[in-house]
């Protein structure tokens, strides 16, 4: 029979819209408006999962986001598979396939259930105690086995086929939670036109009003009041209603993150819509009307499928028209379960209610139920349950005021609704850094002093009566004080920890945390072993640490610790709640930042030319730079050798556009650079360039580059590719905050100027025919000079500089003309065999000449003297950034690591960059390490491999043989000067 | 995410800004006059209080200007922001 547990009438489901889903390969019929949990229960499915540690059969415990047990894998088609979904919050949709998790080979027959039998040897802290030694065993043996045995869902293998978007919003008031308090707050807050956002995690607003069939508000049925309130809000242009939207994070300055589920409830994915939308809301005021969570009762075998929370039983009956059982026993320590029992009876179910409290404590509830023909057993405790894959009975026993337990009896049943009272959902308040306060009257932590512009309202701060919730919400929304008339709600409960029992408490499993399989005895054991802080108990037992964040278990665990220690609850304290309130998909957080948008990619103006000419690219920061240009049949090694030879023998062309460029202009520009760089600038003549090094105030090299003086008050500064932004920021910082009296203006022109490096003995021959207005003759345009003119009719700043050691030019042209100029040079250079070269050849060429690369030869702990640039320091300067630090004693030590060349005894051995260097490879471990290799290449020009290294006291070790680590052992290498080619630097003057 | 009020642009989200550490630590006019200990204190020692802290912010992805702020490090509440070079408002806290 289809839907055997569906009630014939009632509920908020749409019986005109039947739909079909699959559970573990079986067809499940449902109606629009069902949650997956409701659909499963309607079809008589009780067993939906296996527990985390003991693999015990588990069913659906709750009806909402606090669900700890019913975690399902949801399959909506290729690329749309998602693990660990709570069946209680996933909406039933046509065609989805859901399946249970954490069992093998099947849900019905799970071999892991042997853990339940082994449980006497799996106490709290078992993993910590057992798997401490030997350490390597943890990684190789224990952890993989534990991971395989105790798991949640399976991560999907395919790329996520869905789209996720981000949205930012501002509002006067953000109301979180659309129950009675939240609706009242939104009505009051939006009354005067202020912008209000009302968000609720459920598909429908209303909270408890969705399943409270008998309450009235201001004389009307509560359902009508709800409909009227929503109609009013929907009609207000200043109100944004966000159903299916969970506020999961409350951050600084009223910044709230919410996730809106846009797509999953639709039968077919609509490609125009995202699956989920992340809202980042900045609210002037936040109202938290997040309600409360019901507490389970802690008794032996309280986890059998069919044992649910009492209010959830009521929700399934009233809202989904599903009977969670035909014979239901309610077990309670408070008043709210009486309403659930009455509703279950009204739905035609067989109902009994057991109350831990004495009859005199129970108020009007027992009489009300008895009048409806319901058997009420006050002063009874629950000592166990029967059944295996579904509950078949609840074992109860009378208990007197002293906790003496009388004879047991079993109440046959196929469903249990338990209620141990209520816990306000203070998670978001706690995230906002508000201080919680313990309220003895309701045995719960409630919001104390807010830390931000926030008000909590209704059940979220322990107000459980409907009329009071409405008034509290109205006030929180800024409304003038007013009263609401509403049916009194049954409230009040006796706080109970583990229920009194006649059994040996050390032998029974009374679950406190269902999702992490933590029992009352685990908590008792943790306290006995000395874990008295609730934060320690939490970590030792893992209670409250699972994806449900202990929504149902927190107070039970706290209360137990307090009871065992015989201390008041506030002295035990509570744990800190952290985001997210409920699990959030990675997709939502990532949003559109995936694929090509994962990280911005920067390409230079000549990128397309390089790609068309076969370049292979490397990532340099965000840049894609041409790495080398292999010809057909060439590997990288061969290509780089050919490119280097071309530069040394004829001419090469290189895209240096990624260099950072800063235009430094103003009356005091020279003085400014004089203070920023280690070298002197005041006397640099216009038309001349100088290589500059800058330090941070700590004396370590920060960046370097060539600076050209274009005019007395104008400099063209270049920086490293990676340093462009931070050098500009560094300069701005000093200019604005230390020397605001200097008249200097800094402008980034990195993107405006493209730079074409033309390098090699024939560079001038290629360039000359294309340039106008510049005399290229060596005498009038020497090395380290700069000229302005035109090239191919395009304005240029032409630098005669060289990072290769050859005659060379760096041709700056406006970026839009770079391709045209490059093509002209390319055409003109054909007769000289002009060769494009990439960053790898550039690295080799500069290493042959011993030029450093900041970030390769330096690492933030290297001074100018360490890399042999001490001579650049303008000693006459009284001050520059970092100068004082260079005089610190540590900076002057002779054993500082210094830049040297390294030549391996085996000439064709290219050492590994980063390899460690020692003096004696036979010394005992740990060895004294002298330094490391910073750069290492094969050099065609030298006919052998070359390397640069930072070596302790390196300059005093010239000619010594040191030993360098390699994958196959130590290799001997001789310390040499860090210049391997053209040691006098004559070729640049060619 | 903090909401930071640039004195020149107004309230903007934290991601537009770069943090610059403690404020009102002027670079010595003549660093060479300081002994090693004094120089180390200038370079590395910061007050790090729990409470009101004067700190530097740069509106890096906005106007680009540096300014100072008084922030309560315990609550992250900004008590004041003011342009660089202006005196620290007298609102309590350490140096
Ligand atoms: Zn600004």
Image (cartoon, coloured by chain):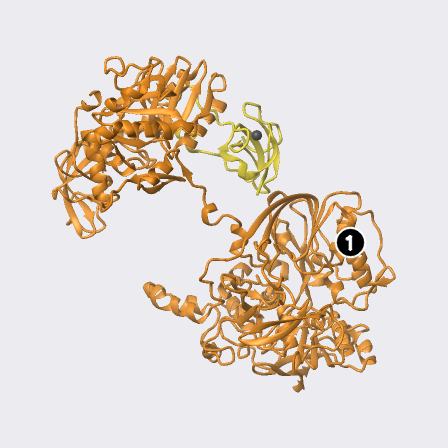
Location of residue A87 in the rendering, given as x and y in whole percent from the top left corner: 60, 68
Tell me if B31 is positioned left or right of A825 in this view.
Answer: right
The chain letter of the yellow chain reads B
Quadrant location of residue A343?
Answer: bottom right
Location of residue A639 in the rendering, given as x and y in whole percent from the top left corner: 23, 41
Image: A488 above or below A322? above
Tell me if A953 is positioned left or right of A839 in this view.
Answer: left
* Image quadrant containing the C terminus of chain A: top left
Q: A481 or A781, which is in the foreground?
A: A781
Q: How many marks?
A: 1
Q: A772 or A934, which is in the foreground?
A: A772
Q: Secondary structure at mark 1?
A: helix
Location of residue A854 in the rendering, given as x and y in whole percent from the top left corner: 32, 33
Question: Which chain does the residue under circle 1 lie in?
Answer: A
Q: Is residue A669 visible?
A: yes
Label 1, residues with CA under 10 Å away: few <14, some 14-19, many ≥20: many
Image: A72 above or below B6? below
Location of residue A677 in the rendering, given as x and y in whole percent from the top left corner: 36, 23
Q: Which residue is mark 1?
A: A184
Quadrant location of residue A900?
Answer: top left
Tell me if B69 is positioned left or right of A925 in this view.
Answer: right
The chain letter of the orange chain reads A
Quadrant location of residue A344?
Answer: bottom right
Q: A761 or A69, which is in the foreground?
A: A761
């Amino acid at each position: 029979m289809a839907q055997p547990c569906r009630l014939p009438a009632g509920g908020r489901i749409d019986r005109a819209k039947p739909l079909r889903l699959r559970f573990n390969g079986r067809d499940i019929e449902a109606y629009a408006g069902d949650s997956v949990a409701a659909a499963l229960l309607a079809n008589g499915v009780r067993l939906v999962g296996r527990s985390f540690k003991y693999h015990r059969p588990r069913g659906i415990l709750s009806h909402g986001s606090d669900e700890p047990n019913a975690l399902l894998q949801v399959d909506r088609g290729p690329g749309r598979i998602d693990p660990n979904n709570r069946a209680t919050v996933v909406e039933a949709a046509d065609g989805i396939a859901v399946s249970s998790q954490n069992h093998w080979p099947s849900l019905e027959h799970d071999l892991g259930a042997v853990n339940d039998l082994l449980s006497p040897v799996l106490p709290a802290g078992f993993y910590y105690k057992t798997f401490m030694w030997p350490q390597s065993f943890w990684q190789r043996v224990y952890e993989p086995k534990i991971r395989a045995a105790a798991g949640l869902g399976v991560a999907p293998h395919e790329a996520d086929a869905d789209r996720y978007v981000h949205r930012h919003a501002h509002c006067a008031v953000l109301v979180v939670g659309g129950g009675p308090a939240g609706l009242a707050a939104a009505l009051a807050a939006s009354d005067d036109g202020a912008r209000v956002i009302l968000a609720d995690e459920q598909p429908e607003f209303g909270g408890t009003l969705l399943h409270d069939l008998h309450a009235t508000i201001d004389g009307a049925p509560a359902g009508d009041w709800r409909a009227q309130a929503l109609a009013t809000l929907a009609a207000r242009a200043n109100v944004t209603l966000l159903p299916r939207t969970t506020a999961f994070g409350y951050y600084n300055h009223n910044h709230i993150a919410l996730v809106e589920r846009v797509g999953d409830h639709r039968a077919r994915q609509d490609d125009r819509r995202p699956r989920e939308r992340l809202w980042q809301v900045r609210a002037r005021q936040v109202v938290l009307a997040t309600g409360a969570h019901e507490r389970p009762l802690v008794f032996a075998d309280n986890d059998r499928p069919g044992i649910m929370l009492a209010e959830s039983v009521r929700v399934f009956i009233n809202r989904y028209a599903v009977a969670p059982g035909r014979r239901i026993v309610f077990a309670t320590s408070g008043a709210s379960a009486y309403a659930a029992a009455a509703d279950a009876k009204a739905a035609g179910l067989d109902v009994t209610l057991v109350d831990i409290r004495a009859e005199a404590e129970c108020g009007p509830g027992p009489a009300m139920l008895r009048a409806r023909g319901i058997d009420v057993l006050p002063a009874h405790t629950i000592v166990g349950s029967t059944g295996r894959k579904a509950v078949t009975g609840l074992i109860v026993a009378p208990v007197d005021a002293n906790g003496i337990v009388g004879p047991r009896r079993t109440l046959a049943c196929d469903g249990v609704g338990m209620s141990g009272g209520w816990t306000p959902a203070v998670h978001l308040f706690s995230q906002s850094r508000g201080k919680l306060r313990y309220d003895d009257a309701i045995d719960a932590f409630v919001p104390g002093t807010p830390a931000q512009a926030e008000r909590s309202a209704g059940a979220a701060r322990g107000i459980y009566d409907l009329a009071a919730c409405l008034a509290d919400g109205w006030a929180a929304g800024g409304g003038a004080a007013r009263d609401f008339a509403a049916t009194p709600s049954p409230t009040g409960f006796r706080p109970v920890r583990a229920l009194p029992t006649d059994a040996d408490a050390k032998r029974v499993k009374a679950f406190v945390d269902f999702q992490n399989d933590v029992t009352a005895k685990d908590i008792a054991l943790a306290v006995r072993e000395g874990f008295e802080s609730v934060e320690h108990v939490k970590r030792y037992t893992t209670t409250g640490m699972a994806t449900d964040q202990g929504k149902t278990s927190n107070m039970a665990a706290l209360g137990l610790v307090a009871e065992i220690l015989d201390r008041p609850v506030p002295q035990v304290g509570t744990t800190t709640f952290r985001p997210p309130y409920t699990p959030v998909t990675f997709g939502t957080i990532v949003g559109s930042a995936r694929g090509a948008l994962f990280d911005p990619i920067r390409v230079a103006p000549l990128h397309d030319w390089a790609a068309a000419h076969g370049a292979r690219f490397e990532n340099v920061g965000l840049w894609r730079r041409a790495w080398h240009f292999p010809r057909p049949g060439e590997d990288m090694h061969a290509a780089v050798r050919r490119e280097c030879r071309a530069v040394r023998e004829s001419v090469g062309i290189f895209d240096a556009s990624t260099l950072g460029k800063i235009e430094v202009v103003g009356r005091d520009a020279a003085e400014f650079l004089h203070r920023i760089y280690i070298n002197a600038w005041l006397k640099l003549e216009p038309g001349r360039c100088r290589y500059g090094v800058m330090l941070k105030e700590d004396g370590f090299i920060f960046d370097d580059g060539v600076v050209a003086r274009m005019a007395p008050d104008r400099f063209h500064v270049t920086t490293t590719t990676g340093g462009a932004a931070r050098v500009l920021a560094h300069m701005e910082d000093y200019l604005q905050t230390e020397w605001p009296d200097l008249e200097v203006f800094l402008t980034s022109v990195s993107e405006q100027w493209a730079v074409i490096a033309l390098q090699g003995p024939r560079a001038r021959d290629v360039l000359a025919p294309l340039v106008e207005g510049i005399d290229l003759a060596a005498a009038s345009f020497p090395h380290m000079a700069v000229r302005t003119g035109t090239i191919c009719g395009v304005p240029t700043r032409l630098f005669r500089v060289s990072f290769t050691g050859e005659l060379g030019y760096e041709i700056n042209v406006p970026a839009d003309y770079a391709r045209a100029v490059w093509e002209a040079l390319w055409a003109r250079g054909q007769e000289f065999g002009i060769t494009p070269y990439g960053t790898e050849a550039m690295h080799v060429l500069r290493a042959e000449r011993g030029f450093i690369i900041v970030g390769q030869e330096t690492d933030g702990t290297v001074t100018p003297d360490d890399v042999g640039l001490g001579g650049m320091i303008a000693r006459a300067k009284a001050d520059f950034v970092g100068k004082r630090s260079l005089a610190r004693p540590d900076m002057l030590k002779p054993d500082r690591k210094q830049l040297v060349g390294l030549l391996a005894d085996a000439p064709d051995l290219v050492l590994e960059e980063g390899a460690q260097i020692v003096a004696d490879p036979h010394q005992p471990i740990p060895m004294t390490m002298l330094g490391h290799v910073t750069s290492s290449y094969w050099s065609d020009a030298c006919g052998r491999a070359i390397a640069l290294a930072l070596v302790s006291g390196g300059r005093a070790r010239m000619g010594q043989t040191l030993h360098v680590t390699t994958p196959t052992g130590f290799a001997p290498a001789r310390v040499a000067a860090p210049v391997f080619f053209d040691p006098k630097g004559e070729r640049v003057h060619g | 995410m903090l909401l930071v009020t640039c004195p020149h642009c107004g309230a903007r989200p934290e991601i537009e800004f770069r943090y610059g550490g403690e404020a009102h630590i002027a670079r010595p006019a003549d660093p060479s006059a300081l002994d090693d200990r004094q120089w180390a204190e200038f370079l590395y020692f910061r007050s790090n209080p729990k409470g009101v802290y004067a700190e530097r912010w740069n509106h890096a992805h906005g106007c680009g200007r540096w300014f100072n702020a008084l922030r309560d490090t315990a609550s992250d509440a900004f008590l004041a922001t003011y342009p660089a070079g202006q005196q620290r408002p007298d609102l309590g806290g350490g140096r």
